[in-house]
Amino acid sequence: MNNGTCYLFDNLTTCDIPRNWTADCRCDYVTANPDLCEGGGYIFYTTMVSCQDPATRGLLLAGFIIWLLILFLAITVAADAFFSPNIAGIVSYLKISENIAGVTFMAFGNGAPDIFAAMASVVGSDTPKVGLAVGGLVGAGIFVTTVVVGSMMLVKPFEVMRRPLMRDICFYLFSVLFSAFVFLYSDFLYLWETVGFLVIYAIFAAVVISGRVIRQRTLKAKANRDAKGAAAVAHSLPISTVAGQLNGHPDIINALTRDDTADEEPEWNFEPILASGYFSSIANGGPAGHDRHEDDITKLPPRTQFTAVFEDLLTAVFPIDEDEWQGNLVERIFAIIKAPLILILKLTNPQAGNHWSKALAVIHCFTCPLFAVAAAQQLGMTLFDSVPQLQLWVLSLIVGIIPAILVLVFTSFHQEPRFFKPFSSFAGFLMAVFWIYSLANEVVGVLQMVGVVSGLSHEVLGLTLLAWSNSLGDLVADIAVARRGFPKMGISAAFGGPLFNLLLGVGMPFTIAVVRHGGPIPIIFSNVSKVLVAFLALSLASSLVLLLVQRFYAHRWHGAYLLALYAAFLVVTLLVELGVIFNGGPSDES
């Protein structure tokens, strides 16, 4: 490798390009090793940047950074506006209890960006990007449990919920320690280890569900006893006496008339899903406030028919939300930026909460199979290997013709079919999965390119760009919730959400990778990864101790400590990445 000489197959485990290589050597290396140097998306970002002259390379790099921001936004929109509402539709249709849905479907909806990013990092290519997955999941956990929680404490001190918060922190700390054991145990990841994460999640879900059931039964029994006692006292006294005694004690009246579950604090933050109106929309058979006239469109003149159909389609796919447009200037600009993304998603992804549009349903009959085929190929499915590409696309179009004819013949323009809500929920859920995974693959591809060009490790990219992009929304939302006087809701989600993401974000993709590999997969637990796990464990353990010392009251100095801890984490990580401390350990690329 001296004097710029390049050896194309010098390292077959990482995309490690010495800085003294010429541009031709870099291009030849990344072209010869796509599994090592690319992220598994549709675009070969590393090859495109590495095989250009310096001026063009700089322009491409800047353009791809902007593209990365668009991808992050697209994942957020797909998860919030399509994935989560369709999950809500499935929960409503299957009549799944709130207790079970809260720690399964709804938690999965909230953690979709993190989980699918980890999935794309591990199974998106033949060479798992373990460091990127671990960096994203653990880095997001550190950010949320320090910066987000600390910011809420600085906004306003508050009393925390003892039982659910202790449970979440203890399970989270145990999961982090189990992660450290798994990754330090050997240089290979075995099936029993990956399944262990899923088992811990199953135990956690069982504890949460059983705890809620017991809590609800206890509250109900207490309310019944209080009601019987009040009735007995009221029956033994004259009405005027009871009324006179209670007249000066409004707190007693409120206690007797309030809801049985008023003391039950929300343990998981599903406010975006619940506030969206999808539950009420699904239950009522259509979106709130949407009146559909029943005139038969076929009785109109042909030109008027076309206009009515076009207006109906335009209403169904219009990408700007009326409430956002009525907001301030920033909200309007953001709505305009999101509009092209929402339009594309609406044309390829059914929504459970949308009103019935026959024209859009026909379009979905063609766009859904086409995009499903493209996404399935990116997932690496071998089902279509024997079918030529052109025939595959033609076949997907033919498959769409059959349901399109059924929709045209057997459905009305203005009367929603009985099967529309459940079918759109399940189909929309599947298409949202394809969309988020495909977008996450592109994110991994861009991050891989940034790592190759800059020399930064996967872990550093994961704990910075990937973790920050997936967690900034939590920071803004939870601070807003704290300012409105509901910090308990935010701090509960700040520990329960990252715990869920860690268990499923490691358990699901690594289990798939081990099964596909046919045995244990090699991993490298770098020094940066060790710093990640150590600081996350320190954050959780110290918060647990400090909350106990403060008698479960979060003071501002606790928040300041958490922010200082995150700053120290960034400094130590930078020193380890530069080799100033812990030099000589395993490579940070994995």
Image: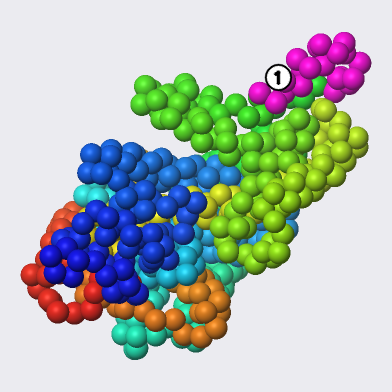
The residue tagged 1 is 311
Q: Residue at x 40, y 25 (%)?
A: 333
The picture places residue 294, in percent across and down from the top left corner, at 85, 23
Left or right: 169, with 89 as reference point: left
The rendered magenta stretch, by its main secondary structure, is classed as helix
Residue 533 appears in the rendering: no
Query: Is residue 33 something that shows in the picture?
Result: yes
Residue range in magenta is: 294-314
Q: Name the residue at the bottom extreme.
A: 185
Q: Residue at x 73, y 51 (%)?
A: 391
| Quadrant housing the C terminus | bottom left
Give x and y (percent) for residue 217: 60, 68
Q: Quadrant of residue 68?
A: top left
Q: Position of residue 447 (x, y in %)?
A: 34, 55
Question: Which residue lies at the image location 88% right of the left edge and 41% below the top edge?
Answer: 406
Q: Residue at x 62, y 58 (%)?
A: 376
Where residue 552 sits, quadrant-wise, is: bottom left
Label 1 secondary element = helix
| 25 in the magenta segment | no
The amino acid type found where label 1 is placed reads Glu
Residue 311: within the magenta?
yes
Q: How many marks?
A: 1
457 versus 397 height, above or below: below
Tell me the quadrant of the picture where the N terminus can be found.
Answer: bottom left
For this rendering, which residue is in front, 141 or 369?
369
